[in-house]
Amino acid sequence: YRGRGGEVVRQAACRLLARVAAANSWTFKEATGARYLQTVDECARHSNESIRVAAVDALRVLSRTRFKLELSIKCIDNYLAGLKKADETISARRGFALSLGALPPEASAERRAEVLQALSKEIKNENLPGGKDQDDPQTRQYALLSMGRLLFDLPNLSSEELQLIVETLKAALNDYATDRRGDVGSWVREVGLEIVTALLEAQSCNNGSSPGRYPQLADKASTTSLVALVLRQAVEKLDRLLERAFGLLRRLLLKGPSSSADPPALVELAYRRVCHDESYRPDAATSSDRAANLSRPTGDESVAWPPVALTALEAAMKSARGGLEEAGCESAIDLAAAEKMKADRSASIFEALVPLLDVADYRPALVRGLIVSVGGITEYIAKGSKAAVLKYLQGTSDEEEASKRQREVSDELVRILATTSHKDSASDAKRLLAPLFSTIGVLLAQ
């Protein structure tokens, strides 16, 4: 286990353990499973990410095929205790957070309150035992993946538990942490987008022929608030998240029976993307049962679906082209052409989504997202978003309608200005104030 060769052996050992555990024709004693767990736990706290992920993958197979319930519960207690230690290493905490989502639902259900609270605290970055020394975006990312798995694994989630998960997802989509590596909060927000759209997919599924199959939100207002957060990411300045948010929302709203995905499988796609560096392809999660659910009358509604202004949302999705990956820019040889296509693509998204400012439920989120795009320093993002906003505010011949739009947007800008602290210690101050004043300047100049 020493040196670079030892790291390769650790990965191979974890993969071999997973294969052996999955082989139904092989039998071994309970003590053998406990011994394998020692190896897995040692590797799960390793500083090498590939070893850590291989260990968690092995734990998922071992615990679901070989462990007794008592041993799985003991694992949960150990991981929760590890997250409470003030002197625990960052790599070990990452392993604990990811492992909590790998254990069988029966065991997680025995400690559901403690597990959900621990993961929520990690994602929200609140009251960490080690303080700022344990502030780590990758731990939050892993905790979010585990919470996504538990969202669909745990049976009969109570309204309080589901509310905790929803509030945690909202916190993840508001993670704008930065360090010397840049916008590390975007790692958390991207996973948050994928988990949120899986939950929204579940609401659509509950609207079909199998109501109650997946966790159901309290009402359409809850669904609408999550859609608003996705829309905000779709008009912000970071083009990777802009593309991802729009693509996820477009697939959710315009999907047909042949492109429908099973919500738990979407969470697994997010896990494979983060932990195994695989492409996020929702089509790979297509479910025949899910497709059957969508063959329903359009008038059939559930408690939480559809969101507000569904017709306007669908029209917006249809008015823009497919994702950047679909356009083939990732493999383009001509970098200049690829950049132009990327600029055109973002401009098309802004033009499609800005008219949703007419919908009061989405306006606050859209304005907050557009502020950092219009007032940002990325030239093609600023240019595309500015053109879309000015077209929306000035592009109608009805003077009364134009005045109404300008008043509504101005009121929202004033509201944001009034609620954003100017103190350097405020989380939104440095991120929002400069682009906010720049955006106001652009509008006043018109």
Image (cartoon, rainbow, N blue to C red):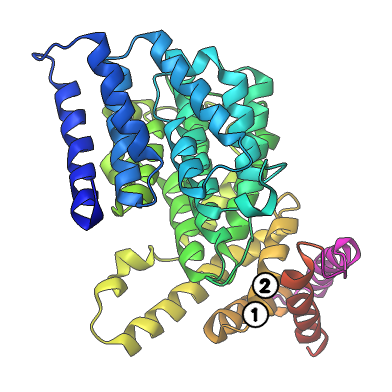
Residue behind mark 1: 376
Relative to 440, say whether 143 is above or below: above
Is residue 416 among what the camera can see?
yes
Q: What span is colored magenta in the figure?
A: 396-425
From the top left corner, tell me how far across and down residue 191 is, in percent: 48, 49
Label 2 close to label 1 by CB (< 8 Å)? yes
* Residue name at image x 56 percent, y 83 percent: 378
Relative to 393, say whether 428 is above or below: above
* Residue name at image x 8 percent, y 13 percent: 25
Is residue 207 among what the camera can see?
no
Give the quarter of the figure containing the N terminus.
top left
Membership of 412 in magenta stretch: yes
Residue behind mark 2: 372
Number of callouts: 2
Identify which amino acid the numbered label 1 is placed on: Gly
How far apart marks 2 and 1 lie (CA) works out to 5 Å
- The image quadrant that residue 261 belongs to is top left
Q: How crowded is the residue under tag 2: few (<14 C-alpha within 10 Å), some, or many (20+)?
A: many
